Every structure is written in structure tokens, then in C-alpha cells.
Image (cartoon, grey):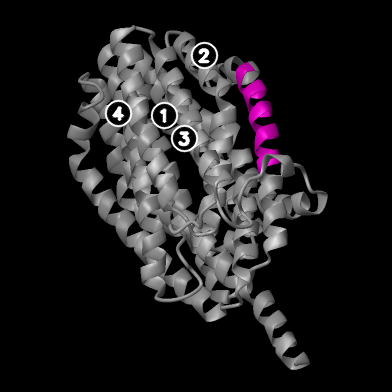
Amino acid sequence: MRENKAVIKLTEGSIPKAMIAFAVPVFFGNLFQQLYNTVDSLIVGNFLGSEALAAVSSSGNLIFLMVGFFQGISMGAGVVIARYFGAKAMAELKKAVHTLVAFALLAGVLLMTLGILCTPIILRWMGTPEDVLPNSIIYFRIYFAGSLGFVCYNAFVGILQSVGDSRHPLMYLIFSSVLNVLLDLLFIAVLHFGVGGAAAATIISQFASALLCLHRLMREKGPYRIEPRLVRFDGGMMRRIISNGLPAGIQNSIISLANVVVQSNINAFGRDAMAGCGSYSKVEGFGFLPVTCFAMALPTFISQNLGARQFDRVKKGARFGILCSVCAAELIGILVYTLAPWLIRAFNNEPSVIQYGMAQAHTVTLFYCLLALSHGMAAIFRGAGKSIVPMLVMMVCWCIIRVSYITVAVHFIPKITVVFWAYPITWTLSSIVFLIYFFKGDWMHAFERQERRKKAEV
């Protein structure tokens, strides 16, 4: 065993330096993940055509619908682990780690079963066109057959990141990204396996990265080392993980369900709309990179420092993370807005496909700052153990209001741009509510009151 020198100490030293040192590897890890997702679509679009591209590129919402709940539970576990790590409660940390691993194994099997059985039903419910449906079913069923690798990878990465190690997940993700690209070329361009080859390449690379993370964690020195003989459910710890993660899981599922409704409305405009909007979604993934990296860094920073009872540091770190995320997201949004015609054309040269992709880009990209603000605030509240707040806000704004708006507006104005505007409108609403809650300070009051009571007792 050896000590993990990649762990960044988030509870001491310069806040900007610590947070950026943690967030930069997360950023590049997400960048490589987005690159290999994009390469999937590029290879499929150029070798297999627009029907196959529509089947693969429209996959994001359905995949997140199926995996979002389990990811939310893992996020709750990350908050618990980070809090124990910051408080140096190592016995509890060890129980949390092994309970999370047991949960990941069970969740992977459940997700595989549900994904394989429910894929055709959900795709038809989404109104997937008949000429796209066969390829979509093949892609999703093969993808969900590898659910165990995906779920375990996220759990293992969550453990590493919760203790401040974002460097090793980056290394493993780079490896799996390169592997995925090579397998894409082999399965699609050489062996002509079709969209099933793209899905197989993805799940093989996911299993590879999961095994690398597991190997690392089994060699760690410290309480977060994984020991197979200790992998079991601890009732009390699972309740803590569920109480922190269940709201995030419900939030993910509800939001993704709303996005599936959005996708079904896009599907109604036909194959070219699916391909164009699917192509934009791959480009949009790059715009989400600063959003995602700070949304992952902030809960770890907040949780560790709350565990260490450094409340001023928590507040300063929250403000710094939000500022960085919002500014970076808006800069990328402006860049994507400007380059949209060339970026969409990289996936497919059909004029109608390009037109749909550009229409979506020119509607939503200048509002990336609001998306970053909402995700950043939600991350802060989750790190403080207030995960019910973002669940309720996003359930109302990103699900109920979004779906209601689309249902009513498209009925009276049957244009696809009306669907696109659902995102900026609901991002704005959630940002306003989050800002009010943030500045009221309710998310910190309980910790500060507890600290004052302890000092009074002394």
C-alpha cells in the first residue's frame, strides 16, 4: 500500500488554489469524456448516415433517465464521505465507502435489467420515428448491458474525488477515451458492426476505467481503501447516504423525464430534427464542462470544510466557485454561438440537419451563465446536506414548468424554436429562486448554531 499523493487538501491553504487544483483535472476528465461521446457521433454520422446518427445522438436524455437516480444516490454518498474525511472520522468513512460499493454492485445489476427490458417501451413513448427505432433499440440495449461498469465507475470516482483526488480519475478517463475511439473505428469502420458497435465500444471502455479505479482504491493506504471482504450494506450508513442522495436521485430522474418529454417534442419534427438537435447536444456538452467541473468540485469542498467546521472558508469557496463557473460557461456559450454552423456541419452535411442544430444553438447558448448558476447553487446546497432544496426547485422549474410551457406553447405555436426556449426560461426561474435562498443563508444557519452552542458549553 502507498499513500495517495494526488489528494488535494481542500480544508487548508489558498481557496482559489485548492479549488482550481481540484477542478482542473475534473474539467479535463469531462473534456475527454465529451470528446469520446462526440467521436461516437462523428464516426456514426460519417460512416453510417443520419438515421444511425439520430439513434445515437438522441441517447442522452433516455440514458440519464435510467441512470440519473443511481447517480444521485452516489452523489449523496460522496457528500457523506467528504464530510467524514474533513472531520477525520475515519471509522465512519470506511463504512461509508464499503456501503457505497455494495450499493453500486446492486444498482448496476438492477439498471441493466431495467434498461434492457424497458428500452423499447420508452423509445416508443418518446415518439421515436419508425425509421430510427430499430437502431435506437439496438444501441440502448447494448449500452445498458454494460450498466455495472458505468455505475461502479461513478461510485469509485466519487470516492476518490470525495477525499480530494481528482487526478487519478482524469488519468483513467483519458485511457478509456482513447480506447473508446479506437474501438469505435474498429467496430464501425473496419468490422461494420453498426450502431451496436458504438454502444459496445462505450461499455468496454467504461468497464476498463472502472477496473482501473478499483485497482487504485484497493491499493490505497487509509480508511477509504476498498477491501472486498468488507463490502456490505451498513444499515445506519445506508440511511445517511439515502437521506443525502435520494433527493438528488429523484431530482435527476424528474429532470431527465422532463427532458425526455422535450426530446419527444423534437422527435415529432422528424429525423433531421433529431439528428440536428442530437449533433448540437454533443457540441453543448463542451459548453457544460465548466458547469460540470465546478458542480462536482463544490460539494466536495463544501462538505470537507463543513466537516472541519471552517464556516468562513465554506462561504468564500462557494462564492469563488460560482463566479468561476458562471464566467467560464458564458465565455464558452459565446464561442459556441459564433462557431455553431461549422460545429454542427462536422457531424452531418445535410442542410436541414445543420439548420436545426444551429437554431437550437442560437437560442440557448447565450444563457449558459444561468445554467452554471443553477447547477453551482444546487451543488453548494447538496454539499451542505440541503439536497431537498435543489430537488424541489428543479422539480418545479425544470420539470413542471418546462413541460407545462412546452405542452401549451407548442399547441398554439407549432415551431421547434418554441421547444428550445424551454431551457433558457426555466434556467432563469431556477437561478432566481436559488439566489434568494443563498443570500438568506438558511443553508448555513444550522451549522453555525451548532458551533455557537458548542462554544457556549465550553
**How far apart are labels 1 and 3 at the CA level?**
44 Å
Instruction: Judge by depth and name the residue closer to the eye, 262 or 372.
Output: 372
Which residue was labeled with disc 1?
414
Instruction: Judge by depth and name the residue closer to the eye, 104 or 412.
Output: 104
Which residue was labeled with disc 2?
137
Q: Which residues are magenta?
A: 101-116
Secondary element type, mark 1? loop
Secondary element type, mark 2? helix
Which residue was labeled with disc 3?
209
Secondary element type, mark 3? helix
Answer whether residue 397 is visible to the viewer in this image.
no
Secondary element type, mark 4? helix
406 in magenta: no
Which of disc 1 and disc 4 is earlier in sequence? 4
Depicted 16 relative to depicted 200: above or below:
below
Which of disc 3 and disc 1 is earlier in sequence? 3
**How far apart are labels 4 and 1 at the CA level?**
15 Å
Residue sitting at x 67%, y 58%: 93
Nearer to us of marks 2 and 3 is 3
* Image location of residue 387, percent across then percent down: 64, 57
